[in-house]
Image: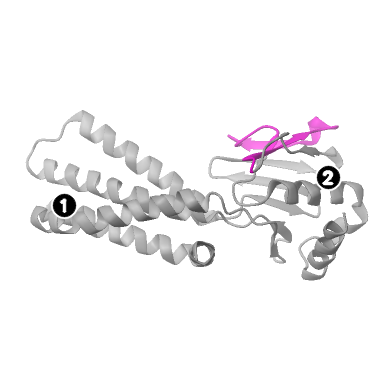
């Protein structure tokens, strides 16, 4: 059941996020301009916030051994993490209440620098979370190499850099996949990359991702076909035989 809900949230994440932002805006308006209505909305919104935060914690453990095929890129991408969508929804409630309280204080002429700074911090954090959840796929295997993106930067590793990937010993569900580069000068980093030498595995089985990377490192003749359904089927067959 949780897997189905998570898959639906990822598949329709743009609609889910827009609805979440709409509800958050309505709550902020209610708290700021109609406090009595805001008090009525508080209990159901608090329960909803708690529910989606619990869902986000559960969804963190769902890491399938599969890729999403993106022929338009072309690329094989790790699935978009459902837990980020739930996490954003959980943060929208408190953030909207903070904005509404600031609006109410402004109308009463009682805004303090502390309140303003706190609300701006909330909004900045929520904005980063929304953009991160909206973008979806984090790690992509492309014909020319590996690309890892997050909202503040990216890491691009050409296949020529020959990344060697390793799952941490004893880790059942590791959060990162470390890489060692034979040609570190070929690696490109933009902005503030999430890591200088690791890939996030919070939405994919780390061993599956490592096996796929090792396969293309050792079989350069198949890289040009990355991004096609036929190559994905061939990759799954090859990995199943290992």
Name the residue at the bottom extreme. Answer: 230
Say which element carries label 1.
helix
Name the secondary structure under disc 2. helix
Name which of mark 2 and mark 1 comes first in the sequence.
1
Graded by Cα atoms within 10 Å as few (under 14), some (14 to 19) or many (20 or more), the crowding at tag 2 reads many
Rendered location of residue 153, percent (x, y): 59, 40
Question: Where, quadrant-wise, is the C terminus in this rendering?
Answer: bottom right
The answer to which quarter of the image holds residue 39 is bottom left
Q: Which residue is mark 2?
A: 159
Position above or below: 84 against 181: below
Residue at 46 percent of width and 48 percent of height:
57
**Residue 199 vertical position relative to residue 67 in the rendered view, above or below:** above
Q: How is the image coloured?
A: one colour
Q: State the CA–CA distance, disc 2 to disc 1.
A: 53 Å
**x and y, in percent, of residue 80 in the image:** 58, 56
The stretch of residues the image draws in magenta is: 173-198
From the top left corner, tell me how far across and down residue 225 is, in percent.
Answer: 84, 62
Left or right of 160 on screen, residue 75? left
Q: Is residue 101 above or below residue 82?
A: above
Q: Is residue 102 left or right of residue 233?
A: left
Question: In terms of depth relative to the viewer, which is nearer, 39 or 188?
Answer: 39
Say whether residue 183 is magenta: yes
Q: Quick check: 142 left or right of 102?
A: right
Residue under numbered circle 1: 31
């Amino acid at each position: 059941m949780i897997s189905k809900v998570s898959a639906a949230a990822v598949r329709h994440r743009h609609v889910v996020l827009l609805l979440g932002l709409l509800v958050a805006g309505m709550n902020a308006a209610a708290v700021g301009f109609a406090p009595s209505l805001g008090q009525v909305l508080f209990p159901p919104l608090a329960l909803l916030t708690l529910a989606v935060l619990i869902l986000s914690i559960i969804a963190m453990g769902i890491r399938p051994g599969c890729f999403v095929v993106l022929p338009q890129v072309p690329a094989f991408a790790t699935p978009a993490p459902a837990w980020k969508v739930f996490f954003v929804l959980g943060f929208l409630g408190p953030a909207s209440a903070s904005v509404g309280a600031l609006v109410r204080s402004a109308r009463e002429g009682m805004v303090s620098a502390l309140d303003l700074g706190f609300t701006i911090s909330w909004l900045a954090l929520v904005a980063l979370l929304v953009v991160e959840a909206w973008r979806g796929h984090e790690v992509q295997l492309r014909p020319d190499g590996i690309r890892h993106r997050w909202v503040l930067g990216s890491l691009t590793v050409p296949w020529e850099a020959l990344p060697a990937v390793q799952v941490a010993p004893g880790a059942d569900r590791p959060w990162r996949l470390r890489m060692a580069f034979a040609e570190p000068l070929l690696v490109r980093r933009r902005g503030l990359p999430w890591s200088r030498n690791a890939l996030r595995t919070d939405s994919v089985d780390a061993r599956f991702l490592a096996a796929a990377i090792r396969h293309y490192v050792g079989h350069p003749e198949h890289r040009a076909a990355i991004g096609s359904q036929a190559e994905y089927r061939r990759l799954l067959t090859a990995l199943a035989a290992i």
